[in-house]
Amino acid sequence: STLFRSSPFGFTLVELLVVIAIIGVLIALLLPAVQAAREAARRMTCTNHLKQLGIALHNFHDTHGDLPNAEYNQCIEMGRTCYDYYTAATTPAWNAATDGFWAAYSCFVVILPYVENQALYEQVAQDTTASNKPFTLSSDSIVSFSKKPAIYGCPSDPNSNVTRVVNPVGSAGNYRVCRGDRPTKRSKAKSRGLFGCGEEDNFGLEAVTDGTSNTLAFSEAVVGTSSNYDQVRGGLAIVATIASTIVANVFEVPFADLNARGPNGTVTNPYPVTGTTGYHADLFRSGTKWFQSASVCTGFHTITPPNSPSCAGAITGTGRPDDAATIAASSFHPGGVNAAMTDGAVKFFSETIDCTPTSGITSFAGYSSGPSPLGVWGALSTRAGGESVAAP
């Protein structure tokens, strides 16, 4: 009898397809929100890292009476900073031919005790004292440089924890010291930025006459690897020929040449995947060593806006990107970068911030003092340029 016929159970094909479509739409709507929430958390962590660096800057100043420098040399235990070339009379003897003659380790080494890494600082002191060098340029390595405080890495950069495996062993880092609005060739280069370059360039907060709230201290940059060597974020564009290490520079390069953007987020004429071997190999990439003072490793400039191409001299003779470079701040945060001001405040700077050169200024050779000719971004990088520009 039809009165007792059971009703069919289950979904028709149309109903199943409708449900699948609804689930797909929900995933499409939710996934971007989840990704945005994760990036917001990563950006907040990055902001916190920079805040801690700003606090460390002031604690260092309270202890020493001076701001930390962008570079240091010799053994950390000796506490000696370096701007001069070392000579045989240096104690212990320093052989420029074999040990190098430039300030080697960065601000991020000396502020370790102020970012709650006293143990690593003491290990670095022990390692460098044992070799009488900041780190060797040949077969030996300072093992402590392969360790990196978590505070030195931005969680939005997937390459923040890359570790160098050739000598000297070392870990990458994202955070950078402000080196002003002119290129800094090699390490021993005085800049208009907040960080000096050694004994002849020590100064404290009294030298920041533009105001601590209007002067950049730290920002960030994407770590370069063999996979992003030709990208705006992480890559380096060749814009000048370098014939020798110390005297070579890119001061005569026109500003127009620094806009080295290629298609699809690439840079024109990038440094190759590999350069020379051994010690120099990773100097062809940005940020590969948190402990190294060369601007290509731990510095940034306000010559171009955030997320612009970073540029350096060509490989000619002994020339390398650590000889002369203009490193742009960069990140994977959407639209710009985080940066810490000298007063400790952390702000987000858009990649569209004004950085347009003043009319009549076409290259770095066109200015050496006074207000920055590179718009708001340039003005924020000078400690005593006389600008009246406040951070947005």
Image (spheres, rainbow, N blue to C red):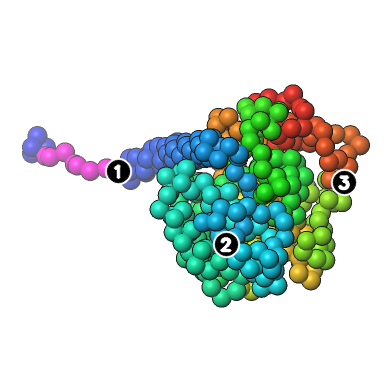
User: Where does the image place residue 300, in percent across and percent down from the top left?
Assistant: 66, 46
Q: Residue at x 68, y 66 (%)?
A: 89
- Residue 12 - label: 1
For residue 269, which quarter of the picture?
A: bottom right
Q: Who is closer to the viewer here, 171 or 344?
A: 344
Horizontal side, residue 27 vs residue 241: left or right = left
Residue wearing tag 3: 365
The quadrant the C terminus occupies is top right
Q: Is residue 17 visible from the viewing direction of this image?
A: yes
Residue 259 drawn at (x, y percent): 78, 47
Magenta range: 5-12
Residue displayed at 34% across by 40% down: 19
The residue carrying mark 2 is 134
Q: Going 70% across and 72% down the picture, which residue do you hit?
A: 97
- Considering depth in this image, is 62 or 331 the residue closer to the camera? 62
Question: Do we see residue 159 in this rendering?
Answer: no
Total label count?
A: 3
Pick the quarter of the image with the N terminus: top left
Circle 1: residue type: Thr
Disc 3 from disc 1: Cα separation: 76 Å
| Residue beneath the point at 44% across and 55% down | 122
Q: Earlier in the sequence, mark 3 or mark 2?
A: 2
